[in-house]
Amino acid sequence: MSKLRRKVYMAGGYNTVSLGTGRKEFNPKKPRPGLEHYIKEAGQGTLKQIGGAKNVDEGAIGNFMAPRFNKQGHIAGLIPIIDEELQYKPCVRTEGACASGALSLASGIKSILAETADVVLAIGVEVQNSMKAIYGADVLAGAGWFQKRKNGHAYFFPGQFSDRAGAYYEKYGLDYARKGMKQWFVNAIENARLCPTAQEYENKVEDLGALYDKMKPNGKVFVDNLNVLDCSKVSDAASGIAIMSEEGLERCGISKDKAVEVISFSQVERNLTNDPPDLTELTAIKKAAHQALESAGITIYDLATIEIHDCFSIAGVLSMEALGFAEPGKGAQFIADGNTARNGKIPTNTTGGLIGWGHPTGGTGVHQAVTMLEQLTGNAGEAQIEIPADRPYGMTINMGGDDVTVVAIVYKRGDI
Amino acid sequence: MNYDERLQNVSVLGAAGKMGSGILLLTAVEMADLSLKPENKGKTFCLNAIDVSHEGLAGLMKYLKAQVRRIAEKKTVLLRKLYAERADLIENEEIIDEYIFDVMSIVRPVTTIESTYNSNLIFEAIIENLDLKIKLFSQIEKNNPNKPWFFTNTSSIPIHILDEGVKLNGRILGFHFYNPPAIQRLVELITLNNNSDEMVDFANTFAKNLKKVIVPSNDFAGFIGNGHFMRDALHGISEVESLSQEMPFVEALYMINKVSQDFLIRPMGIFQLIDYVGVDVVKFIMQVMNPNLPDEDLHSDLLDKLMDMGVKGGQNPDGSQKDGFLKYERGKPVAVFNPDTKEYDNIAEFQAKCDEKLGSLPESWKPWKVINFSRGKKETMLEAFFNELGNMDTLGAQLAKKYNARSNEIGNYLVSSGVANNTEDVNTVMLTGFYHAYGPINDYLK
């Protein structure tokens, strides 16, 4: 894709708390806030920063499976509950499994580019603690091809990525691979501890590595090649952000240093009915990331930070290889050496990612954009990393299904 | 008749009771799992849930449904394999629902004893009434042509008395679950010399498939579990009686309950345990055991007195604790029953005074919950605690040392009198059946 024909910005990011196991206030036996609460909180959180709903031209909401998790369809119709002034404005719901959130961003970006809107309110939401994990696994399996569900694992997606991990172990060695996956987990929790909305914010475990080592994968109770620490969280959360043109920024009174500019984006789709061509490769992520970098005219070495879709730690390892930070088979080493830690070569998932911050499936893409906005504009609080002047870019990768729908977005601060 | 055939037709007597419902649940699940084996395709499995109460049976079916769902949710990986051939069952939820249906379909809730006449195996979990047991067994024996095996859950009646009373010639054994059977891992197995090997093998396999820990106990009234518990309880009661010479009864009871819980690092105090089991049940078990123990008097006037006043303890149908010696709020004791006024006196009113009299707990003290689940460190923690306790001379420490010595004595007596085969069996029963953190036969306080 060539350069964007119009400047596109994002501002006004807001995250609700990621609620689920790990958070003190989470009690599976007590009633919890529903979809409406999260949509409202995230939406209003963003509107407050952009001068209110009157400034919004369109709404887009990413959500994966509310029709099953919450028995609620027609999610775009919930956007006007955020503010009365949103009523009768165009709204759309986007769905691409766990990439639903980034699809709402892509939809908003396209509206800006098409000049049909100057300000798009983008929301991502999922409320998935409405059922036990064993039933939630059925719902999430919808991100795969249903024809393959019967022969899949009870925990379908952990099963898919367990197979990927197994193939990686076989090719490159079990202990070697798990060293990298362990470090991925440790980084995720340590970063989450710096972000008050993160699900693992209150994680107090002293020796995370020892905990990881103790929990050997056990196919009898879970999947063969992953333990639960290799998995992202089951989360209820929403995030909101505004996507704007230059005119939009002006209308909302937001200076460019408080915004990020979207330099490029890439959206790809792999055939859902096909098995991955190679279990140890994420080809759709590779394609999307490289297209986005190419249209931005930069390389991975220009990136200050990245947000990776670590639905499983092995996805983190494979992503580092797909992006080109490590050669095939060297991703685990790259991570084990500390390169993805917050003080490493390429600080990754600086607020915990899907394993540490949480993974409200349809909301994750928007959460990634909010983290990127906060980091690049210096508003990440305790979690703030240094953004070097000579590599001011950030990139988010949001993946749906087993490397099927992928959206990669490249950003930098609006005023540089 | 092989294992699977034996389990094709089973009856549980007293199925709606506290113990019966758990036994029924575990048996139903085991039978359903057998019915799903390819070699058993087309065979019918039937489990009669027999109870006198229609109301109880209705409650049982609700309990079963909820519990089977929990079990199914935990073994969905396995269930997906068992239902692999069923193309119509794709999602976990469909498979779990089908499994619940399959388990429930095996169970026939009825109030009529005639249903047992086709069974190969009878589980008995009715009240501890010797005459009633003999009457029911005899009726079944007379009408059932299959020469069924009788597995009784009695916790107190010697099995040979039932065997002789019904003339079963060894077709009975004691298969004593602990409360609640679905959770407690212990089964006391009481066999008779004239049991067939086939029957004992079956009992062992069945227990193993239910993931139970078997402890063999010899055929003496009360066996190991109640053999210890009843005597331990009587010690607690006698300590209260002697302490209440110097202080009000309610304070004495509070103190002994605290000593037997905190100072001995047990999951609950002795009076809370009596309430949990039921004052009536404890009294009843003693009554059944007593005639079989010529050298001892297992009896308490205090228990009689409470029973006369209608103070029974036990649990409500929802599992919450009824008031007994103690009054409970959200499962925690808040008041002590005063037999003089027939009212409960709030613990808060005298707790501080009593705690001061008892003296503080050793510094190395940690609650039972912490110590019992500290894998690898438990032994060191217990040693440190008892070391310290041994060197203390407070009232609490004195009472605790005496209590521990008595528990130790009871444990050893169970071995020397031939109830248990060895000290390890006694300790296993207390560890697994009563959730103690350590066995009664120990050297902590040399």
Image: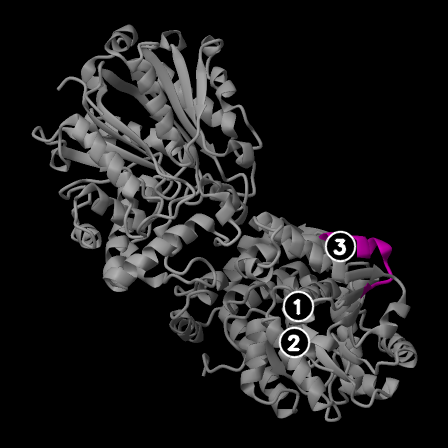
* CB within 8 Å, label 3 to label 2: no
Residue under the point 61% across and 53% down: B96
Query: Which chain is indicated by disc 1?
Result: B
Colour scheme of the rendered structure:
one colour
Chief secondary structure of the magenta portion: helix
Residue under the point 23% across and 35% down: A289
Disc 1 and disc 2 on one polypeptide chain = yes
* CB within 8 Å, label 3 to label 1: no
Quarter holding the C terminus of chain B is: bottom left
The residue carrying mark 2 is B206
Residue A39 quadrant: top left
> Does B52 lie within the magenta span?
yes
Q: Sequence-wise, which precedes: disc 1 or disc 2? A: 1
> Vertically, is A382 above or below B117?
above
Residue A264 circle label: none
The residue carrying mark 1 is B30
Total numbered labels: 3
Mark 2: which amino acid? Answer: Phe
Mark 3: which amino acid? Answer: Met
What is the span of residues highlighted in magenta in the rendered image?
B49-62
